[in-house]
Amino acid sequence: NEFLNLHLPHGILLGHGGSLARAGKVLQQLTDQEPCYSRARYTVRTFGIRRNEKIATYVTVRGEKAKDIISKGLAVKEFELRRKNFSAAGNWGFGISEHIDLGIKYDPNAGIYGMDFYVVMKRAGDRVAKRKLRKGKVGQRQRISKEEAIAWFEKTWNEDFAKVLN
């Protein structure tokens, strides 16, 4: 089965020092979508964050738009990922240190932000375990393994280009 349900939540985690509004504008420029904000669950005095304070911004992108954004991010990484970038559930992710490498014009007011890309791979039928009524289990053959995700990655982004290093 082809993994049609490609889902890319990626975001910028700032902590206490950065401006979330400016980071949100960077994500909006990249995806043409309104970003969402994550809040702290509890106060951590050593990090200087309080409960319910906004600490991160993220956007969830699906479909062809997600593939285009992932391609831009992988071009920064030269289409090379490590095996440890892939989880046992078949999801994978990577980070970049500067958003201007994606082709976004530098704005001195916004500054430069790093970004995390995380790709959630699913086959059709995964909702069976998530729905409220008549919940069921997703069988082992329906789940995506680490090896399947690596094979899909190398096939999707041309085998001579994309590499998974040890």
Image: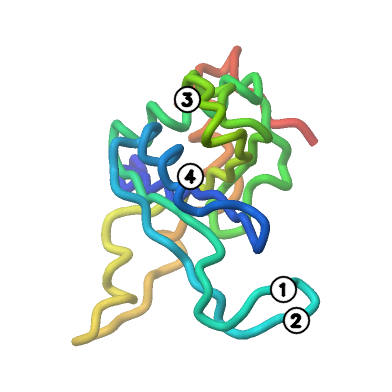
Amino acid type of disc 2?
Answer: Arg
96 or 137, nearer to the observer: 96
Which quadrant holds the N terminus? top left
Q: Earlier in the sequence, mark 2 or mark 3?
A: 2
Say which element carries label 3: helix
What residue is pinned by disc 2?
45
Q: Is residue 90 above or below residue 83?
A: below
How far apart are the alpha carbons under marks 2 and 3? 39 Å
Specify whether 67 is left or right of 151: left
In the rendered image, residue 24, in percent from the top left (x then y), is placed at: 43, 47
How far apart are the alpha carbons under marks 2 and 1? 5 Å
What residue is pinned by disc 4?
22
In the rendered image, residue 44, in percent from the top left (x then y), is placed at: 71, 81
Say which element carries label 1: loop
Q: Nearer the viewer, mark 4 or mark 3?
A: 4
> Which quadrant would residue 3 be assigned to in this image?
top left
Identify the mark at residue 48; answer none if there is no mark. Answer: 1
Q: Is residue 81 above or below residue 33?
A: above
128 or 116, nearer to the observer: 116
Q: Earlier in the sequence, mark 1 or mark 4?
A: 4
Q: Nearer the viewer, mark 2 or mark 3?
A: 2
What residue is pinned by disc 3?
71
